[in-house]
Image (spheres, helix red, strand yellow):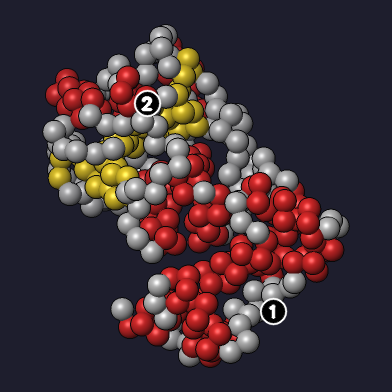
Amino acid sequence: MSKSEARSIFVPDPTPLRLTFLVLSGASLMCVASAIDPLRAANRVAGETLFDWSIVSIDGKPPLTTAGLPIAVTGTLDPTARHDVLVAIGGFGTRAGSSGPLLAAFRRAARSARAVGGVEAGGWLVARAGLLEGRAATTHWEDLEDFSAAFPGVDVRPDRYVIDGPVFTTGGASPTFDLMLQLIRSRLGMAAALDVASVFIYDQARAATDAQPLVSLGRLDGYDPRLAQAIRLMESHVDRPLPVSAIARRVGITARTLEKIFTAAIGETPGAYSLRLRLNAARRLVLDTAEPMADIAARTGFSSAAAFSRAFSSAFGKPPVRMRRG
């Protein structure tokens, strides 16, 4: 996988990424959702398909999750299919063993992938395929000791998730969500990752190296706390936007300092981010409700329906009425 090392998926890149998710019977429904739904939300936020995926199983039949709910699949794992990322999502039973044909198919499919991942117990399959030898990895905290004993050549860590070159592993559903936010942030920028997190009312992505399990404090750890405070003010005043100077004053800093914080963390000015926050809220109302455009304009802080339509068209390439009809 030396060539894959040079083509990391965790770098700025707006080109579409193709992912294949191998869901194993006994996987957690939340792990499946945490792996796939952030990518779906990223496509929706972007208005285009930046992440394209397929879901497969060992035998082509819908695998049953721990909740007893089946996951629809497009077929079996095709080792000759083209994909950028191959991800195994496993749970109860995955650690018990894997058949020779499955390991052979997984190894072959991994050869052409830029990255390979193991979600929760999916790491056992990745390790049995020999793809974690000499690398750092993690799995669910309940299995860490057994995983370390089973694979002495792997640097097993109690981290929430681990990225080591072209291979990544996660400890469970919440760390998987965090990993996907990092993927989105790495490829599309911090602003896009915040937009995706807001879709799920998800306030915090813990550091990858934080130990499992942890209590989520609902904060934007790793970033200036004044950034989170300013964003919360913007969110609470979508209908009546505060001037940047007023936001800065409430945060206790100058407008210039606030601009520096936003530019460093998000790559946008506070004013630009506030506008995009309001327009994203407006787009959800346009697509998901039948509210009149004038009401949406008022709810998202625009002085008139005409001003709202102009800003909306500039941001999304079409006026709100056309987007709703489409």
Up the image or down, 43 lies above or below 208; here it is below
**In the rendered image, which residue does mark 2 sit on?**
6
Q: Position of residue 112 (x, y in %)?
A: 23, 29
Q: Is residue 190 visible?
A: yes
Q: Position of residue 245 (x, y in %)?
A: 79, 67
Closest to the camera, between mark 2 and mark 1, is: 2
| Amino acid type of the residue tagged 1 in the rendering | Arg
The residue lying at 21 percent from left, 49 percent from top is 73
- Nearest the viewer among 78 and 121 is 78
Say whether residue 143 is left or right of residue 208. Answer: left
Hey, which quadrant is residue 252 in on the image?
Answer: bottom right
Label 1: which secondary element: loop
Quarter occupied by the N terminus:
top left
Q: Which residue is mark 1?
A: 240
Q: Nearer the viewer, residue 260 or 286?
A: 260
Kindly identify the amino acid type of the residue bearing the numbered disc 2: Ala
